[in-house]
Amino acid sequence: MSWYSSFLDQLDNENTILEKLSAKAAGNGFSVSSELISSWKITAREVHRLKSLLDSSQNTSNEVGVVFEYEIARRSKRIDLVILYKSLVFCVEFKTGQEDISLQNLRQVEEYALDLRDFHLKSKEKIIIPILATGLQTSRTTVKLDSLKVNTVGINNLSESIIDSVISLNSDDKTNLQDWINSPYKPTPNIIEAAKSLYINNTVADIANYGSVNLTQTVDEVQRVIEVSKKENLRSIIFITGVPGSGKTLAGLEALHKIRNLENEGAVFVSGNGPLVEILREAIAINQSELQKISITEARRQMSTLIDHAYKWRNYYLNNTKEIPPEHILLFDEAQRAWTKDRLTSWSSRQGERVEMSEPEAFLKIMERVSDWSVVVCLVGGGQEINTGEEGLSEWGEALEQLTIWKINTSPKVLDETENQSMQLYENKKSIPKDINISNNLHLEMNVRSPRAEKLNNFVDSILQNNIEQAKINLPSKFEYPIYLTRDLKEAKDTLRQISSGRYGLLASSQARRLRAFGVETNLLRSESGNAQPNWFLKDENDIRSSYSLEIPATEYDCQGLEIDYGLVAWGGDTYFDESTGNWVVRKFKGTKWQLMRSEIDFQYGLNRYRVLLTRSRKGMVIFVPKGDNKQTTNKEFYDGTFNLLKSLGLEIV
């Protein structure tokens, strides 16, 4: 949790401190730059000066602890220097090469202090003093920000400022350095309550709409399992299923919101879908900031307590094997995308920490650390695995065969052999435990009046399964879900703008690299800096960063689990229909050439990319298929077959 720590009376010399910091940085995979070394030298010098001043004024150096590069648990941040003395916690950020006191730097140190206050158990009820130490500043000032007052001092005056507080303190507290360093992540009740309030009148429904008729029954069933698990001290796992647009994500968020006594039981919503996490956080934070008249920064901090990246949550507890999650309830979105044992082992080995288990096994074992009882809620949608190492629910089934302590509560869909293979929990029916609880309420049924009719999902499945006659039957009517087809990009954009009565945007496969030749540049959104994906989904039509501009497409990675009202799907040559064989062909563009994907899993990933793209629009869509040309990488044969297939299904040509 820290790169170096010591009581002042046991402090190493400056060179030894630098050696230990460098070794720790290298061990954590960080490159040690000359700027970082320079900053450490200044920090070590000032800490030694503080020791000298304390030794000459009073004998307290054995009670003052210093912590260099402190990593705040589950917050992915490091504080330059923390100084501990009894009930005081000095949170110091150095800006060695800067003379000015910028608002950005002030907010940085304020946020560190707030993270300690709200998420760090051993800092609870401590006096936290944020300090910004800059290069040439001479006077000591205090700046009032949104939540805290931040002290600003020149680096050469830092020790004197701290000594003033130490000498004047009248406290019987003890400085327990190691306890503070090893403090667990524990959101305070006030931050949990603030996060819960974010759900009131929020805008999440605009980007993760649902059309299920039994969402309330599903949430009630989750609540029932939680109450039973708590009462009987059980380890329970729940599998909720539903087609795209049925509301799985919102079911999880709704359950999270309704969990009673959340400050005591604890719950966290995690997802391996990075854009989904960022966009959900941002959507709710924007709304809360406006409703409650608080800063967007504070709203984002509050939201981060309930919605987190799956890999960050997982890695923290795998790397800290003695840490116990404060949450009794874990909601895992898109659980079918959890990593296999081979994928997690390979990835962890490259990070220097070899973990020989699948991601489902890792999450279950982590939740077994929680005292008395725990519940894992898995939100499942089949046919949307798009990354190497994602092989559906069977990894969860294998983990549960080993970890028999878990009581299984599930939708019947994960036991149905007629379902997509990625939706099947057990490859062998004999593995199904006899005490499994099967509930129809755990499958989200679609409302036939929903703008996202289930017929669309069946239509897309039929196309990608090469079941042409069934696709014709499943094609939604123009009145319930209009779908237009064109070979002209300008016409496609004009048509989309004409039919849209809500948010619209451009969508394209991440592997459709040669769409560049036809005016569509893929993967730009992921490479943009800042809040590119939240901006695309949330900004209005007057903002060029928004989806309305139709300039930058969202790929399957950007939009999976999210929705817009109307989409323009640009169909590339990475997955095309070969008229000569009557089959789909899946490829990837590498270097200057297309490469055929021959393995079954890579072929399925290619189809799933378009399954995601074709099910992102809740009210209607336009499909653009380029005409192609006679060049090797953009030959018309890569596009004509797809266009002719879609045309034969009855799509309206524009």
Image (spheres, rainbow, N blue to C red):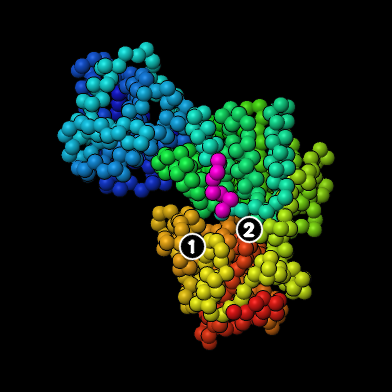
Observer-nearest residue: 599 or 163? 163
* Amino acid on which disc 2 is placed: Glu
- Asked if residue 340 can be seen in this view, the reply is no
Q: Is residue 627 toward the left or the right of residue 154 in the image?
A: right
Q: Magenta region: which residues?
A: 200-206
Residue located 62% across and 42% down the image: 254
Task: Indicate the position of residue 514 as horizontal and vertical percent values.
Answer: 50, 75
Task: Indicate the position of residue 436 as horizontal and vertical percent values.
Answer: 79, 40
Rate crowding at label 2 as few (under 14), some (14 to 19) or many (20 or more) other CA atoms within 10 Å: many
Q: Which mark is residue 547?
A: 1
Mark in the foreground, 1 or 2: 1
Where is 360 relative to 627, above or below?
above
Observer-nearest residue: 177 or 87? 87
- Asked if residue 11 can be seen in this view, the reply is yes
SS of the residue under disc 1: helix
* Amino acid on which disc 1 is placed: Ser
Task: Indicate the position of residue 8 as horizontal and vertical percent values.
Answer: 30, 23
SS of the residue under disc 2: loop
Q: In the displayed image of the protein, which residue is found farthest to the bottom?
A: 630
Observer-nearest residue: 311 or 168? 168
Check the picture and name the quadrant holding the C terminus.
bottom right
Task: Give yes or no for contact between labels 1 and 2 (Cβ–Cβ under 8 Å).
Answer: no
Where is 579 relative to 319, above or below?
below
Q: Earlier in the sequence, mark 1 or mark 2?
A: 2
Residue located 38% across and 42% down the image: 25
Residue 175 highlighted magenta (yes or no)? no
Residue carrying label 2: 385
Task: Indicate the position of residue 192 as horizontal and vertical percent values.
Answer: 52, 33
Where is 247 relative to 383, above or below?
above
Residue located 50% across and 41% down the image: 303
Q: Quadrant of residue 152?
A: top left
